Amino acid sequence: MDRTTLVAHARASIARGSKSFAAASKLFDPVTRERAWLLYAWCRRCDDVVDGQDHGHTMSAVADAPARVREVADLTAMALAGKPTGDPAFDALGLVAAEVALPHLWPRDVIAGFALDADEWQPKSADDLYRYCYAVAGAVGCMMAVVMGVPPDDEDTLDRACDLGIAFQLANIARDVGEDAAAGRCYLPHDWLAEMDMGPGEHMKPHYRPRLAVLAKRLAGCAAAYEASARAGTPALPLRSAWAVLAAANIYGAIGRAVADRGEHAWDHRVTTSRADKLGFVAKAGWQAARRRTLYPPVSRDGLWTRPR
C-alpha cells in the first residue's frame, strides 16, 4: 500500500479505537499527526490480535494467546526490516520507523508486554507493575517522542515521555479493574492486595469494594506523580507537540482522579470524559503549552521507576 492509503487506514483506526488520542492528535502539525496515526495503528492492531478484540472493544479470552504474540512479533520484525506484511497496521509501523529512524528496541519491548499477558502473568510488587506499564505504554511514549522529533539519544526527554505512558497505563488499570477481572486478569500487585487482606481474583467481590477503592486511589496517586514528571519534559517539545501531549495528560489525568474520587462506586459505570470535557482539556492544554517553560521547570525524577536503557 502507498503512504496515502496507510495514513487513511491509520486515521480510521484511531477514530474507532480512541477518541481521546484522536482528539489530542489533531493538535500536531500535519507531518507529526500522520506519523502518530501510523504508530497508533500498529499499537492498536497488536493489542486487538493478542486480546481477541476489535479496536479495544469486547476483549475476550483466547485459547492461543502465545501463538498470537508470535504472530505479531513476526509481522513486526518483517515491518521493521522494511518488508511488506500484507497488513496495513504493520506496514504503517515499517513506514514510520523508516521515516524517523525509530529504534527497534521499543517495539520489541511492547511485544514483550503482550507476552506477559499471554502467559497470564500478574505483578507481585509495584516494581513488577511499573515494568509492565513500561512495556505496554512507556515504550510507546518513547516511540511517540521520537515521532515528535525528540532525538533517540535524548535520554532525559525520553524518560519523561516514558513517564507519561506509565501514567496513562496506571489510570487505565485503576479504571478497568472490573473489566480486567472479568477477563481473568489482575494488575494490582499481590503485595498491595495482601496489605488489604485480599487475594488475587477476590478483589471484585462486593464486600471488598472499600478496600479496592483504597488501592485505586493509590494507583491514581502514582499516576499523578508520573504525569507531573512527564509535564516537565514538555519544554523540550515544539509548541504543537507540547499542546497535544498536555491535552492527553489532562484527559487521562482526569480519568485517574475521577476513579479516586468515586471511591467504591468507581466501577459502577465506566469512567469516561465527555466531548465537552475533552474540548475544555484541549483549550487548557493550549494555555499550558504556551507557558510550559514557566509552568513546568526541570524537576527531579528521584523516587520514580526508570525504564531500561
Image (cartoon, helix red, strand yellow):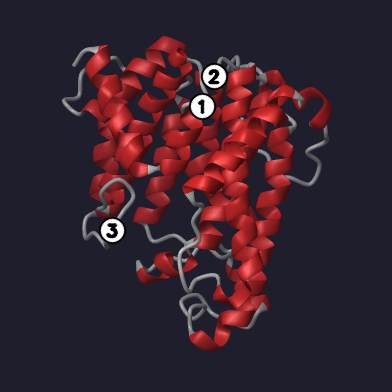
Classify residue 171 by image quadrant: bottom right
Q: Position of residue 173 (x, y in %)?
A: 52, 58
Going by the numbered disc 2, the residue's amino acid type is Met
Describe residue 59's horizontal placement relative to residue 105 as left or right: left
Q: Split into 4 quadrants, where in the image is the C terminus?
A: top right
Q: Quadrant of residue 49?
A: top left
Q: Residue furthest front?
A: 276
105 relative to 254, above or below? above
Circle nearer the N terminus (3, 1)? 3
Q: Which residue is mark 3?
A: 58
Tell me the CA gap for discs 3 and 1.
26 Å
Q: Name which residue type carries label 3.
A: Thr
- Seen in the picture, residue 226 relative to 178 is either above or below; the reply is above
Q: Position of residue 109 (x, y in %)?
A: 46, 36
Quadrant assignment, res 215: bottom right
Report the disc number at residue 144. 1
Q: Which mark is residue 148?
A: 2
Residue found farthest to the bottom: 207
Location of residue 186 with respect to 21 vertically, above or below: below
Q: Residue at x 63, y 83 (%)?
A: 197
